[in-house]
């Protein structure tokens, strides 16, 4: 699956290396090999959504967008149109059939590699056509199997970066090639001007580095606590200032997606507020119109509009939603 090109010099997607690695594996296993170009689809549903989101002050997750619209969207449709029964991917998740006959998406058994969070936006209708063969394995065992059967990519490093950036360019610099810079003031929560920023899209809630403003206080550093879109101001405070708005005790969600039967009403669930965040207990009211309000038992740090919350019932992923409003705690 080819999703990006770097002929314009923006991003260094290692697609040629990826393709040759996949081709070598296919030849070793004596499997047919073909490349599907999803560049246009990926550009519309991932890259453009990412750029527009950051330009509007949000923090969208490209992996969520890719899984919903590209991997388990367009690629799955093409697989079916070519006579395939299942689309298998290397995500560390599991799909099991319950006694009721319903399919459930579960966490992978390797807690260090579990990727179920990134499935929170996938269409439920795709589940019968998906296979996750690595979900019952640890990463260590996957490497061992690859060595045992002589796969040519057995020692290949894991990918850690946004795929179309390839680790060669920062997300901020990539966005800066598409979003016009709009410099503005960096201010404290009480309105004191502390410095200047090049553009709000270059900053994220909870950010400490790259602000270039001295704290003039021992053992204290400024952290981004808010983006004032209307006045083009970046708001900062000390981490220790619990009333700054860095922490929140409730959020509003939109774009709800369920991998189970849709839930309506008030329930208590486990939630992963970001990837790899420790699951926390939440009190959720699902309204039935694609929105929900969520209250936390423990305050949460540095959540941002556009990010995704995933809901769980034990090991089972129920779905997720996008942060539309953050209930920031202020003094």
Image (spheres, grey):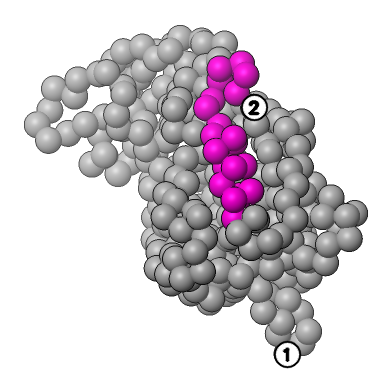
Element at label 2: loop
Q: Residue at x 57, y 28 (%)?
A: 54
Q: Is residue 238 left or right of residue 196?
A: left
Element at label 1: loop
Between 272 and 216, the one nearer to me in the picture: 272
Mark 1 and mark 2 lie on one chain; the one further toward the N terminus is 2
Residue 211 lies in quadrant: top left
Residue 52: x and y in percent read: 65, 26
The residue mark sitting in front, 1 or 2, is: 2
Q: Which residues are magenta?
A: 6-25
Residue 194 lies in quadrant: top left
Instruction: Determine if residue 55 is in view.
Output: no
Residue 187: x and y in percent read: 35, 19
- State the quadrant of the C terminus: top left
Residue 199: x and y in percent read: 47, 16
Q: Residue at x 26, y 39 (%)?
A: 239
Number of the label disc, if any, that sits on residue 99:
1
Q: Is residue 155 left or right of residue 151?
A: left
| Numbered label tally | 2
Assess whether residue 10 is covered by the magenta stretch: yes
Number of the label disc, if any, that sits on residue 5:
2
Residue 144: x and y in percent read: 42, 69
Residue 230 lies in quadrant: top right
């Amino acid at each position: 699956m080819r999703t990006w090109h770097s002929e314009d010099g923006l991003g260094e997607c290692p697609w040629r290396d990826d393709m040759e690695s996949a081709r070598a594996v296919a030849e070793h296993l004596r499997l047919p090999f073909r490349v599907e170009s999803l560049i246009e689809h990926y550009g519309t549903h991932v890259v453009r959504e990412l750029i527009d989101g950051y330009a509007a002050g949000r923090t969208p997750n490209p992996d969520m967008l890719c899984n919903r619209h590209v991997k388990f969207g367009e690629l799955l449709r093409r697989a079916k149109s070519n006579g395939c029964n299942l689309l298998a991917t290397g995500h560390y998740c599991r799909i099991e059939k319950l006694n009721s006959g319903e399919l459930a998406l579960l966490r992978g058994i390797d807690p260090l590699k579990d990727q179920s969070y990134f499935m929170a936006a996938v269409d439920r209708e795709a589940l019968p056509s998906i296979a996750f063969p690595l979900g019952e394995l640890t990463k260590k065992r996957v490497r061992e199997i690859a060595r045992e059967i002589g796969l040519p990519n057995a020692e290949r490093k894991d990918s850690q970066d946004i795929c179309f950036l390839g680790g060669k360019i920062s997300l901020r610099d990539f966005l800066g090639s598409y979003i016009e810079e709009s410099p503005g003031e960096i201010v404290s929560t009480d309105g004191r001007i502390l410095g200047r920023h090049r553009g709000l899209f270059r900053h994220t809630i909870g950010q400490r580095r790259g602000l270039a403003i001295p704290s003039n206080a021992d053992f204290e550093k400024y952290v981004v606590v808010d983006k004032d879109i209307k006045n083009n101001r970046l708001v900062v405070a000390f981490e220790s200032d619990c009333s700054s708005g860095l922490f929140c005790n409730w959020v509003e969600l939109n774009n709800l997606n369920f991998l189970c039967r849709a839930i309506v009403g008030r329930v208590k669930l486990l939630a992963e507020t970001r990837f790899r965040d420790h699951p926390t207990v939440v009190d959720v009211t699902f309204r039935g119109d694609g929105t929900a309000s969520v209250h936390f038992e423990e305050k949460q740090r540095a959540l941002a509009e556009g990010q995704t919350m995933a809901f769980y019932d034990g090991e089972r992923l129920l779905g997720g939603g996008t942060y539309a409003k953050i209930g920031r705690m202020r003094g």
